[in-house]
Amino acid sequence: MTAVEVAAQAPVAAVEVAAPAPEETAGPVAVETPPAEALAPATPTPPPTTAELYHRHLSAGRAVMGTVLGGMAEVYSEGVWVYVDDGRRYLDFGGYGVFILGHRHPAVLDAVQGQLGVHPLATRVFLEPVAARAAAALAARTPAGLDHVHFVNSGAEATEAGLKLARAHGRNALVTTVSGYHGKTLGALSVTANSLYQEAFEPLLPDTAQVAYGDLGELEAALRERRDRACVILEPVQGEGGVRIPPAGYLAEAAALCRTYGAFLIVDEVQTGLGRLGSWWGVDAEGVVPDVLLVGKGLSGGVVPVAAMVATKDAYGPFSRDPYLHTSTFGASPIACAAAMAAVETIDREDIVGRAAALGRHLLGGVEEICAPYRERLVHEVRGRGLLIGIEFTQAQAVGETLLELVSRGVLVNHSLNSTRVLRLTPPAIADADEVQFFLDALAEALRAVHTRLG
């Protein structure tokens, strides 16, 4: 017990106080009785709600969004489920691609808790073995030649590291794709092709061109103009762009064009990698080995934020020779690297890649069947690969309406930041048949309700 608590519970000593001499009065003294409310005990002020705290200290806009969704606060998670403060649970088929292993996977938790108990953060003075082993584990699963790992804390930081590495090689002319999404820090925002996010922060990095995703002609024209000054960044499938799947052969041809014109190639697999597409990496289907591969989201194991830039030996040279050229205090922390190593090994051991491929085929077929009666009137198209699935609606309003209907039925999904008409599904690969059916039933009811309202 603290001294303050002891003092608060101690009895108050009696103290004799001499009474003042009575004053002579001409008659009786009137005593005014205080109002009853002044004598009543004070009502304690209730603590602010989570929404109120968001409004005061985090984001008024997020407070409004949370209130629209019901004002619940998420307080617990396990597997495919997220629980809120009133005890209800929600099937998480969103999570922006983070939870390929679900929430709080036991293998990742054990690794993180073990590291937390011995050495969670490093001094950055000595060599640190957990980062070394995590880098080896990740490099063992990347395409051949991508052996050098630079750990960071988020996907946007991985993009920044990739862009800086390209500049260290003299590639300072950027080529990105329309609707491509690579983060919102200043460099990453320069190649995140959405004026809604860019305009408030302009001017961004100079000499940046946008080409249509999947259009090799536009890409070649941009490279012909910039040649060996160019750094190309693209995704195997555009996630925030609305689950845009390029034509077969696009990645391989894009990589060949980069070689022809001496361009530096960054492939952003922050969302698509680590099994999300039903393969370890989106580049695997066409045998592409870029100069840099960006990794994130699922690398966290759904427990500790961590991302990475993985490069070939030649590309990584400037960072390898000078370890202080690009640094981060918390990058490659032991606790984050423990999560990353456990996540990669669990994905391998539990065949998450194979499960994602099989579950994705089943789920995509179910979603297509449910959406079929609403084609052209409400739903424009359903598309996906593995466990990255998009439902494109005929109007943007339907996305918000469907999202709210799903929430009311106990399901969480995401909208697409660079495509306002696409509802995006990124479920965990650990979902079982009953959980998938729960989602499909909820989706059928949600679409029926939205169609009734919007016609």
Image (spheres, grey):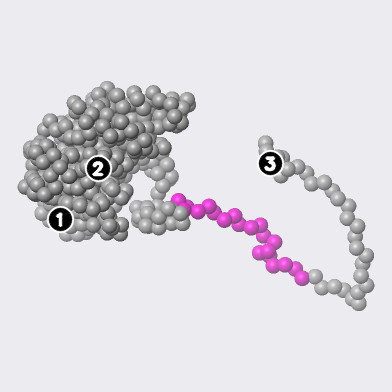
**SS for tag 1?**
loop
How far from the left and from the top, in percent, is residue 143? 19, 28
Q: Which residue is mark 3?
A: 5
Q: Which residue is mark 1?
A: 394
Residue 430: % across, % down: 27, 31
Quarter of the rendering occupied by the C terminus: bottom left
Cα gap from disc 1 to disc 2, whole angstroms:
41 Å
The three-letter amino acid code for the residue at tag 3 is: Glu
- Residue 77 as seen in the image, left or right of residue 454: right
Specify the principal SS of the magenta part.
Answer: loop
Indicate the secondary structure of the residue bearing disc 2. helix
Residue segment shown in magenta: 32-53
Counting residues from the start of the chain, the first of labels 1 and 2 encountered is: 2
Q: Quadrant of residue 368?
A: top left
Mark in front: 1 vs 2: 2
Res. 167 mark: 2
> Which residue is at a point 59% across and 55% down the rendered structure image?
44
Q: State whether residue 244 appears in this view.
A: yes
Quadrant location of residue 154?
top left
Residue type, numbered disc 1 = Thr
Disc 3 crowd rating (10 Å Cα; few below 14, some 14-19, many 20+) is: few
Q: Is residue 412 magenta?
A: no
Q: Position of residue 337 (x, y in %)?
A: 36, 30
Q: Mark 3 or mark 1, which has the lower sequence index?
A: 3
Whichever of callouts 2 and 3 sits on the residue coming sooner in the sequence is 3
31 vs 72: above or below: below
Q: In the picture shown, does residue 206 fall above or below 90?
A: below
Label 2 is placed on what type of residue? Arg
